[in-house]
Image (tube, grey):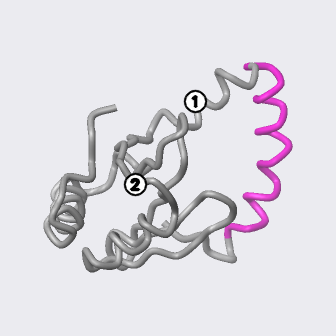
Amino acid sequence: MSISILVLPFAIAAMPVLGVMRLTMGEEKFNAWLDSDIVRFHTNFTDQDELMVAVKKGGYDAAPWGKDSVKTHLNKEDWFFWEIYKNQWTMRINKSFDKGEVKKLMQAIEEKNGRQIFISG
């Protein structure tokens, strides 16, 4: 899921189109459309440091990515973000990712930390 330099001109060209879509659809519908391929798993992490320590303890990487966001690689090709959503740290992951790998990540993090981390939202 990384961006190739070769597609950068196309991404830049698409920006005005996305801006027009946002204006015509309205911000709420536009954001819902952008998030339509996303699943969020809520956690009971209290802060970014706790999240990063727990994810690393589970055997995965966790790198700060902007304000209130952490990037983790699911495997060599796929990565996702942890972010605050409705005042709660959530794992924001693409629906197309291998469900087995996602489940393995969640189990590893909980097992290595000795507690339930993922909660129903």
The local secondary structure at tag 1 comes to helix
Identified by mark 2, the residue type is Phe
Task: Identify the main secondary structure in magenta.
Answer: helix
Q: Quadrant of residue 3?
A: bottom right
Identified by mark 1, the residue type is Trp
Kindly identify which residue carries mark 2. 45
User: Which is in the foreground here, disc 2 or disc 1?
Assistant: 2
Q: Which mark is residue 33?
A: 1
Q: Nearer the viewer, residue 82 or 43?
A: 43
- On the image, the x and y values in percent for residue 117 come to 26, 53
| Magenta residues, start to end | 7-25
Q: Quadrant of residue 8?
A: bottom right
**For residue 83, side relative to residue 26 (left or right):** left
- On the image, the x and y values in percent for residue 80 come to 45, 61
Residue at 41% across, 52% down = 91
- On the image, the x and y values in percent for residue 6 come to 68, 75
Residue 16 on the magenta span? yes
Q: Crowdedness of circle 2 by 10 Å Cα count: few (<14), some, many (20+)? A: some
- On the image, the x and y values in percent for residue 116 come to 19, 52
Residue at 15% across, 65% down = 114
Q: Crowdedness of circle 1 by 10 Å Cα count: few (<14), some, many (20+)? A: few
Q: Quadrant of residue 58?
A: bottom left
Residue at 21% across, 68% down = 113
The local secondary structure at tag 2 comes to loop
Q: Which mark is residue 22?
A: none
Residue 48 on the magenta span? no
**For residue 114, side relative to residue 34 (left or right):** left
Question: 23 above or below 67?
Answer: above
* Residues under numbered marks 2 and 1 in contact, where contact means CB atoms less than 8 Å apart: no
Q: Nearer the viewer, residue 54 or 2?
A: 54
